[in-house]
Amino acid sequence: MKTTILRIAIFSAIVLGILACNKDINNYHDSPQLPEVAYDYMQIMAQTDDFKLPPAFDVNMFAPTSSVVLEDFNITNINFGSIENRPNIDIVNNDVATLGRVLFYDKKLSKNNSISCASCHKQHKAFADGTALSEGFGGKKTTRNSMSLVNPIMNNSFFWDSRQHSLKQLTFEPITNHIEMGIEDMQTLVYKLENVDYYANLFENAFGDNNVTPEKIAEAMSQFVASIFTRDSKFDEVIENSSAGLSGLEMHGMALFFSDRTNCSGCHSGLNFSAPDVPGGAYQQSEGTANIGLEVEYADNGKGSGKFKIPSLRNIALTGPYMHDGRFNTLREVLEHYNEDVNPHTHLDSKLKENGTPIKMNLTELDLDALEAFLVTLTSKSITTNPMYGNPFQY
């Protein structure tokens, strides 16, 4: 009797699982559902103009807690930076960005209608993938980890090897990549979209006519991607209000992050916590890349000499696995690498070595806990749920 009941329970669980899966599959529709009035992407972009340190900022708010004294802590020399050069985006039009959103989520942009840009850049993962290597249209794996797309407007270079400096090229490459989406050339995509009924009105609203061109596709997608912007993390609230809002552990982590002891902010600088690759910046020549001692000999040499893009740390708690190959599953593993596992590569970044030898930070477990806690404060409160960035084919 018990065996029969157990079998029934297992069978029921399997049936419910199948129904749940089918519900997810059926939840994906062939045409998008869009609001009657387009989302205000222009207003989102306007916020980037103020992406700098507020005049009322009080450096004393970052002083270490009384229980943890860091003698080398000094925030007065920190350069929080500002936007210098936007990557070929001057303004965002709401209707153009709306078209870009549809294109971003449309699986018809792949060779066999199975993969969209969002397949590897998932909203709930802060537009990263959540897996070390992404799966392309034919089931093959990409050779590098899919980077988060949040706040791309703050970057001057893209991809792990910084090979592109244009958001339009950022959108073109995955579409025509033989592993990722597999479209032979952009003209092939043009012919394909011309035969999709809902695109005529979308292109008409965006550009004044329904002609589909590679340039319009790139413009629309780049405007949508450019609008994926956030500055509503716990850290931002503390900065804006100039008032204590972090826990003691988070404050300790912040102190460590900006201290000479770790020099984390030397590579992850500015309010976007990304590579200072602006003109005159420390990483201008390497285009925002650095060798961080992951290997002594690299199978993938990145931009060259084992140098890879220094990513933004915003939403970093959501975007693992980490590094160009997704080798680290957790933030703790990343911190432990910098703490004691940096390899002595010839081209190791100067900030990670002293007298030619990798620096051992000798951080305690409490220090590592604190750094991790601080990094979590960089998580946006809305980017993963905001409907203007969501999938219009799921409703």
Image (cartoon, rainbow, N blue to C red):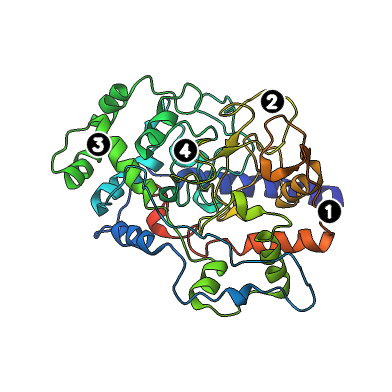
Image quadrant in which you'd find residue 182: top left
Q: In the image, which disc is placed on residue 362?
A: 1
Q: What residue type is labelled 3?
A: Lys
> Are the two marked residues, 2 and 1, in contact with CB atoms closer than 8 angstroms?
no
Q: Earlier in the sequence, mark 2 or mark 4?
A: 4
Q: What residue type is labelled 1?
A: Asn
> Residue lying furthest right in this view?
2
Q: In this view, does 238 lie to the left or right of 336?
A: left
Q: Name the residue under label 4.
A: 158
Residue 82 visible in the displayed image: yes
Nearer the observer, 17 or 291: 291
Q: Name the residue under label 3.
A: 216
Q: Which of marks 2 and 1 is nearer the N terminus?
A: 2
Image point 65% across, 34% down: which residue?
325
Kindly report which numbered mark, 2 or 1, lies closer to the viewer in this rendering: 1
Nearer the observer, 285 or 143: 285
Q: Earlier in the sequence, mark 3 or mark 4?
A: 4
In the image, residue 238 above or below residue 162: below
Q: Which of marks 4 and 1 is nearer the N terminus?
A: 4
Q: Name the residue under label 2.
A: 298
- Binning the other alpha carbons within 10 Å of mark 3 as few (below 14), some (14 to 19) or many (20 upward) gives some
- Binning the other alpha carbons within 10 Å of mark 4 as few (below 14), some (14 to 19) or many (20 upward) gives many
Q: Which amino acid does label 4 sit on?
A: Phe
Kindly report which numbered mark, 3 or 2, lies closer to the viewer in this rendering: 2
Could you tell me which secondary element the residue under label 4 belongs to? loop
Q: In this view, does 46 lie to the left or right of 176?
A: left
> Are the two marked residues, 3 and 4, in contact with CB atoms closer than 8 angstroms?
no
